[in-house]
Amino acid sequence: MRLVRWLAGVLTSAVLGTALELSNPVQRGGGDVTFIFTGVEDKSPVLKSIQNAATLRTIAVDVPLVHRVNVDDARVSEFMLDGELALPGLYKLLVQDGKASRVFHAALTTKVSVAHATIHGTKVEFGSSLSAIPTLKPRDKFSIEVGLQDAYTFKPMVAHQAVLRFTNTESSVDATFPLESTTDSTMQAAVTVDASLLSGLYDVQLIVGDVQFEVYCPRNSVSSLTQNSQNAIEWNLGQVALDIPPAPPAPSPPLYTTSLLHESDVTLHALPEITHAMRPPAARPREVVSYVFTVLVLVPLVVFVLWALRTQSLANVPSTFGGVVVTIGFFASVLAVLGLYGLFWLQLTMFAVLTYLAVLGPVVIATGHLALHAIATGRHKASNSTNKPKCD
């Protein structure tokens, strides 16, 4: 039935709306605590229930709120929780203001200090740090055991969150490890050094926090404690040196098991620049050798031309017009082929030379055949004219 009434109150509050607010949700416990509510609309507001959020224990039900005289705002009411019941922790308050209801969350805090601490086998007072820097190798363990207590009642307490943080002094890369609570309300952790950590010097810090904590710092320990939050203990434990050898290079995967661009797809760093080195040109001979070779190549051609001029070879050229044309065409095509060889030596490629030869070759064959036919025809006519008998 309580759950039904609470749900009905929440729905009514959502529909009708209310300006009811809890002005002091965080207070110190251990004594009489007064909760102040502002924006009260009804003349007789009621605290329907107050419950410990951790133990779900109901502390009080159906308690009328007391109107408080306030010059600035007359719509103020309060509820006082007895000191014996105001234990540190989280609480839920269900308040009914007329037909509207609303749930408030409150926290009662207490001062907390470290009762005892054992760091890497050495007992250390709260606020102090390790006097020496231990060196840890792979598979070594860094252990810590911490016990918290209420600074007033000395009752053991367990934090909602407790972590051990290692911060590399060079790269500022940190790693956190949680502490686990035991049956005797002691928190402990044993960190095993492995390859996930970098080799080097680390700052070790213990961070313990809870919403119900008020950190109690001894006067002689200010230098080892960091006051970044009033609900957390940040204790600088000292430094630790990790001696971790570099990891061996990963073996190359078998061929065709990964894509060609696998490394560029998965890497998080810049790949080394690929520099393409062209093959150096072959060493060329001296200019004298080149000139001598050129002369040796041209000498047979020059000798052939001189021999043709000194002998009676030109006398065999046909005397007819057609014979002269095909003979000149034959010599011109032969000279064109020789010139093509020269161009191939100087600038043309093999494919270009073969293309031109495919055109000049049939011309050389055709003109040569016609020239030889004209010479043979001329010789035949000449022999017939010399062998013909004369008439008396």
Image: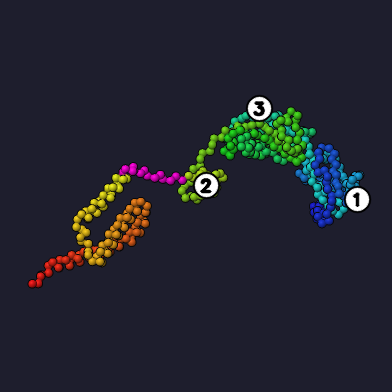
Q: Residue furthest left?
A: 392
Pointer 1 or 2: first along the chain:
1
- Mark 2, Cα crowd under 10 Å, few <14 / some 14-19 / many 20+, is few
Q: Which residue position is annotated with label 1?
A: 43
Of 95 and 313, the residue lying toward us: 313
Residue 381 vs 82, above or below: the answer is below
Residue 62 vs 161, above or below: the answer is below
What residue appears at the point 25 percent right and 51 percent down from the top-left corner?
A: 302
Residue 269 position in % (x across, y down): 56, 44
In magenta segment, residue 46: no
Q: Secondary structure at mark 3?
A: loop
Pointer 3 or 1: first along the chain:
1
Left or right relative to 356: residue 247: right
- Mark 1, Cα crowd under 10 Å, few <14 / some 14-19 / many 20+, is few
Q: Which residue position is annotated with label 2?
A: 263
Left or right relative to 225: residue 295: left
Q: Give residue 106's quadrant in the image.
A: top right
Pointer 3 or 2: first along the chain:
3
Three-letter amino acid code at the position of disc 3: Ser
Three-letter amino acid code at the position of disc 2: Glu
Q: Which residue position is annotated with label 3?
A: 131
The magenta stretch spans which residues? 276-289
In magenta segment, residue 287: yes
